[in-house]
Image (tube, rainbow, N blue to C red):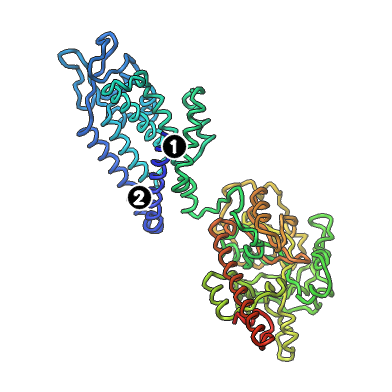
Amino acid sequence: MGAVGGLLGALFNSINTQITIYRLKYLIRSRRVWRMAEAVLIIMCTTAAVSIAVTVLGTCVPFRNDDDDPSGGDHIYSPGDTSFRNETIDYFCPDHGDTKNVLYYNDLATILFNPQETAIKQLFHQNGAFTLPTLWIVFLVYFILACWTYGAGIPSGLFIPCLVIGATYGRFVATALTVLEKQFPILHFLTNLYPGTYALIGAASFLGGVVRMTISLTVILIESTNEIDYGLPIMLTLMVAKWVGDIFNHGLYDIHVELNKTPLLGWESPHRMEKLTAEDVMNPDLKYLYPITRVGSIVSQLRTTAHSAFLIVTPVSLDKVHQKPQTMAHHTPQLYSRREPREHALSIDSDVEDANPSPVTDDSDPEAFSNPFSLSINHNHPVPSSAVASPPGVGGHHHGDQYTHARAYPTIAEVEEEVDGGGAGGGDLVNSLTVTLPLPEHSRGQGIQPSQRRKDEQRVLVFHGIILRSQLVTLLQNKIFFSEGEGSQTQPDIDHRMLSEKYPRYPSVFDVSVSEDDKRMLMDLSVFMNPSPYTISYQARLPQVFNLFRTMGLRHLPIMQDSGIVVGIITRHDLTHERLHELRHQKKIRERATQRANRRLRRNRRKRGGYSGFSNPQDLMA
């Protein structure tokens, strides 16, 4: 019974998967009226199927007591249970009995017209109350309707319908064995067979074949039936049903998680992923803010992205990073030397960047970027416009000057095109992930040498912390910002509990009213950011990244390079099995291309005694 239950569960999951794929493709993405129409259609079909089946295919079964006919006769016999008699339905059956004072009930209507909980109780406990055709019809009706209904736009469950289907299947087996025992006396050992036990085992087998759970379902069924003696048979049945079902497909819950693209991580990383590193998996397209940011830039970021967190960074000149090992505290000394959250001054010393101030940012452009390295912000003095760092626009482009990430995430087609067309490989990660930021106004003149312009343009992002979208929206809602002409000491305080008191239903940024005057205000994010989130090196192997993400329950994992430079971020979407397998396939293509280039290089060297003009394998890949 466990094996058959696993097969039936796999069939149920396969049919429901095809229905769900069609539903996601044509109904959910269309107008809401189509989803409502599907729900109405399901209701109409359910009503029509049940009514027609009960009227046309229902069987009038005689109901007797032991005192009326102890022998039971040749017809269906039901014990003299008053509660069962009250739960029967005489749908188109004689309600006053025949000439022999025999009462009748419609066994099909008794199952289909009663609540599902009552039907399960009758299938578990009433001996010989239902005929074989009735059990077969109930099984088909429930199987088809439950398979169609699950996943529709109506509040529907899966647990109780699966119990009814499985109990009907088990009861059918028990009743069939009883009929065979009467036809073939050699099967006399089936005389004392109790159909309720088979109904319980059948319910466990089908439910296990659909959802593929073992221990939890065993406990649920034992607690529901109060039959501790059946613990071992139920567990064995569930295990066999799971093993058989797993041969064909996954459990129904796992299937819907995959179809809905929910980033639900497994317990362990996929196999054979040791060659992947955090650099291969991370997303280098960062969405970030600066410690002192204009409110208009924050609102723009929140309204144009769906990210749940933003990095707090400071751009630093790339040549300063290569000169000597430095820490984040060296890049922003006063930010990290503060003792109290509100007792600090934020400045950049001359060793990091030239102290030439840049012109005032044009407030008409909320995405405007001014040089953040000339700023000298003191909480006791007004903040000049040149000290305000407004992040570039969302999506990788900035009005006027462009900022782009030099390294993008390739698709399989791009990888193959690069291999065939001669892509360059190797290089320092810092150089490959530098951000080309807009130049200050004073360095955009014609007198600036091209080499100096390139040196000023190349910058990297020094990581300070991370702040959540919900926190930013709460800060905007409570107007936690200060005027540009005043010190940040005038920024209002907010209790930390207020940042999470509306969990989990945080307000949307579109529900927050922000005036044009508010957009010109400034916000000190360094007070509210998390300065010590979990981070990991870009060289870390994927299993290490996956285990850290999974065991600590993370949502965002910044990827770090030397000297506190952030080069990417990993979220749950980056660690799904489908994405990891795609990345592994891309890396295999690159490795094979490199191997082919090395073989060509060795052949060429053997033939001509040298590299014949090629200096490395990358040249041969061109």
Q: Kindly indicate whether the residue at mark 1 contacts the one at mark 2 (C-beta within 8 angstroms).
A: no
Camera-nearest residue between 349 and 607 = 607
> Which residue is located at x 78 percent, y 75 percent?
374
Q: Which residue corresponds to mark 2?
A: 36
- Please say if 318 is above or below 293: below
- The mark lying in front, picked from 2 and 1, is 1
- Please say if 449 is above or below 467: below
Q: Position of residue 114 (x, y in %)?
A: 33, 29
Label 2: how many Cα within 10 Å (few below 14, some 14–19, many 20+): some
- Please say if 64 is above or below 12: above
Camera-nearest residue between 601 and 241 = 601
Q: Position of residue 454 (x, y in %)?
A: 72, 83
- Element type at marker 2? helix
Camera-nearest residue between 163 and 363 = 163
Judged left or right of residue 101, residue 290 is: right
Q: Position of residue 273 (x, y in %)?
A: 62, 58
**Snapshot quadrant of residue 576:** bottom right
Q: Residue furthest left?
A: 99
Residue 435 in sight in this render: yes
First along the sequence among labels 2 and 1: 2
Label 1: how many Cα within 10 Å (few below 14, some 14–19, many 20+): many
- Please say if 21 is above or below 58: below
State the quadrant of the N terminus. top left
Q: Residue furthest top?
A: 67
> Which residue is located at x 42 percent, y 28 percent?
200
State the quadrant of the C terminus. bottom right
Amino acid identity at mark 1? Leu
Q: Which residue corresponds to mark 1?
A: 207
Judged left or right of residue 360, residue 135 is: left
- Element type at marker 1? helix
